[in-house]
Amino acid sequence: MQNLISALARIEPLSQGQEEAILALKPFMKHISLKKGNYLYRSGHIPDFVAHVECGILRHVIMDSNENEKILRFFQEDDFIEDCKSFNEQCPVNYSIQALEDCELGYFKFMDVVHLYTDYPEFEKIGRKMMERNAASYELHLSALMKYNSEERYKFLLQTNPDLIKRISVTHLAQYLDMNRVTLSKMRAKMINRQIL
């Protein structure tokens, strides 16, 4: 529970009421270990839980119309994975969440804690914090894809999340930056020669 409280407090300081609300989740929190390559869920499922990444890294991946994988985002330590829209509308997701390293996650099922919303209205603000953080991360990446050329996208990621580049393969990096793997490798080599990296 302390990991969850710390992660939320890093987004924005928590009130005493919010901490009490989070502690009320304790009886419902479960843990899951995922081996590298395993899926938290796949396209076609309806996720019924919120997960908190305690350690490891996962990718949020979709297939385009040509059956090419595209990575929309990565989830790392202290990130939250949720899809309330899919659960509320009971519609399957069109993406998958896959572990790229051995991962440990804490999670709780929506239906297990729905009754807590009456006793702890602070959950609404906590949920909004999680969704806003996820949306901000996705929007930052999306705007970089729209705004920058290939080299600028790579440099932007170097500036904003250098540790990520060290933890993922060139293939996954290329899928995330929306470029060909060979193009990315050549570009990185040129940048090293120019002493940019």
Image: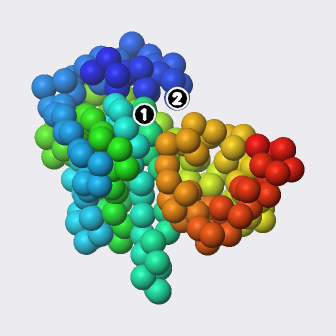
Q: Nearer the viewer, residue 4 or 126?
A: 4
Rendered position, 34 above or below 26: below
Instruction: Give residue 60's position: percent from left, percent from top.
Output: 42, 58
Residue at 21% from the left image edge and 27% from the top image edge: 25
On residue 77, the disc is 1
Q: Is residue 32 left or right of residue 69?
A: left
Please name the amino acid that badge 1 sits on: Glu
Q: Nearer the viewer, residue 108 or 158?
A: 158
Which residue occupies the extreme bottom position in the image?
66
Q: Residue at x 37, y 50 (%)?
A: 100
Residue 109 appears left or right of 191: left
Disc 1 secondary structure class: loop
Crowding at dot 1, Cα within 10 Å, few <14 / some 14-19 / many 20+, comes out as some
* Residue 89 in sight in this render: no
- Point out the image quarter for the N terminus: top left
Give amino acid for label 2: Ile
The answer to whether residue 54 of the structure is visible from this angle is yes
190 to the left or right of 161: right
Q: Secondary structure at mark 2?
A: helix
Q: Which mark is residue 11?
A: 2
Q: Is residue 165 above or below residue 5?
A: below
